Image (tube, grey):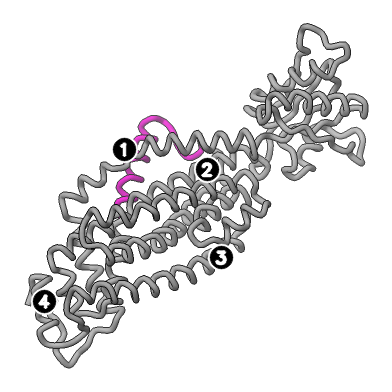
Amino acid sequence: MTPPSSQGRLSTLQAALVVARRDFHAVLFSRSFLAFLIGPLFMLAVSALASSVGQQVEQTAGRPRLGVLMAPADTAAMTGAARRIDRDLAGMLPDLVPVAPPARDPASPQTVLVAQHGAIDALLTGTPERPVLTGASGLVESLEGPVRLIAGAAREPSPRALPPVTLAPVTVPAGLDKVGRMRTAQLGQTVLFLLTMLLAGMVLSNLVEEKANKIIEILAAAVPMDAVFLGKLFAMLAVSFVGIAVWGIAAGSVLVIGGHSLADLPAPAVGWPLFLLLGVVYFAMAYLLLGAVFLTIGSMASTVREVQTLSMPVTMLQLLVFFFATYAVGAPHSWSARAAEVLPFSSPFTMLARAAMEPGLTPHLLALGWQGLWVALFVRFGAQLFRRRVMKSGPAGGGNGKPRAGLARLFGRT
């Protein structure tokens, strides 16, 4: 690349692209990045921990809701027995809710279940002596034991043997499979969080290394510091997409060889193509927000030890943000879910989960506009603080002549 003449001055965007291209090639073809690609293998422990938290959410806030459509006396007996047992087994039993008889009588249990529009996950009919459980295949099997326990407690006097439950698995529309959508939402959140935390840390190590080698001073003398900040941020985002592509191809190959596919997972409410596209966009938003914070921290640190000290609170806060967004999945219409959608750092995780659980594109367009506004604010604030901090250790610039020559030497070209 031939540097511009002393009369031609690079704009901030042009200078940012020059820095981004330089950082992208420097990081992508380094031996450390090749070793870094193996890093996700050591994140399996974190994934297992997040999975256990997700299962706890399913057992509490997201436990199945079981509609009861029996005679009034039998309905009262079943719901009363469930409340008595649930005092000792809190969170282990499904929620039993009475269902009003349909206007068109008789109506099949499947028709009644679909008419509830996702308010219940399965329907219990018949009598406490011979209950009939209607719902999605897999769900009714998991609820057989709890229903037998509740039905046995509802019978007076309660016999020694629990009554048998007749299972009636039916095909439930994908939009009503709340438990399956919740699992997909939790999986998407976990993958998004792990990728963000794993890849955002690269901007710190890259910046500290260049400050130690005085490279940052040459950049500061050659181009505006805002351009340096933007260039490094977007270069690391591009490198992150390369890493995600490599890991995605590797994971896809393992799944294909093992005879698995996305069809084995519960389909998200918006469909797999749009869900994956939203996942890429929300990752970019989360990465830019966290990367701007990490770059600002890196500008205030001169050693690796200082970086670790300053970044630890941010990492802990990000963990709290992730668990807050995970908790919001179990209560999608509560104040906590709305707060998680509005807070900039938790919004990408919460909205990705919403894409898995609820159809519709309009909320995501509004959320992306809101997140983009915060990305612009954080990048602007981080660039200003970055400029003030870094300029203390090197010459100021954006000038001509020698600074341009320094930039040319940095790229190893004339």
- Horizontal placement of 72 versus 205: left or right? right
Spatial separation of the CA atoms under disc 4 and disc 1: 39 Å
Name which residue lies at 73% across and 27% down.
87
- Horizontal placement of 70 versus 272: left or right? right
Quadrant (top left, top right, bottom left, bottom right) of the N terminus: bottom left
Q: Which residue is mark 3?
A: 365
The answer to whether residue 30 is magenta is no
Q: Which residue is mark 4?
A: 408
Q: Nearer the viewer, residue 106 or 327?
A: 327
Question: In the rendered structure, which segment of residues is drawn in magenta?
Answer: 242-263
Spatial separation of the CA atoms under disc 3 and disc 4: 42 Å
Foreground label between 3 and 2: 2
Name which residue lies at 76% across and 14% down.
164
- Compared with 272, 369 (above or below) is below
Quadrant (top left, top right, bottom left, bottom right) of the C terminus: bottom left
Label 1 amino acid? Phe
Disc 3 vs disc 4: Cβ atoms closer than 8 Å?
Answer: no
Q: Earlier in the sequence, mark 4 or mark 1?
A: 1
Q: Earlier in the sequence, mark 4 or mark 2?
A: 2
Label 2 CA crowd tier, 10 Å (few <14, some 14–19, many 20+): many
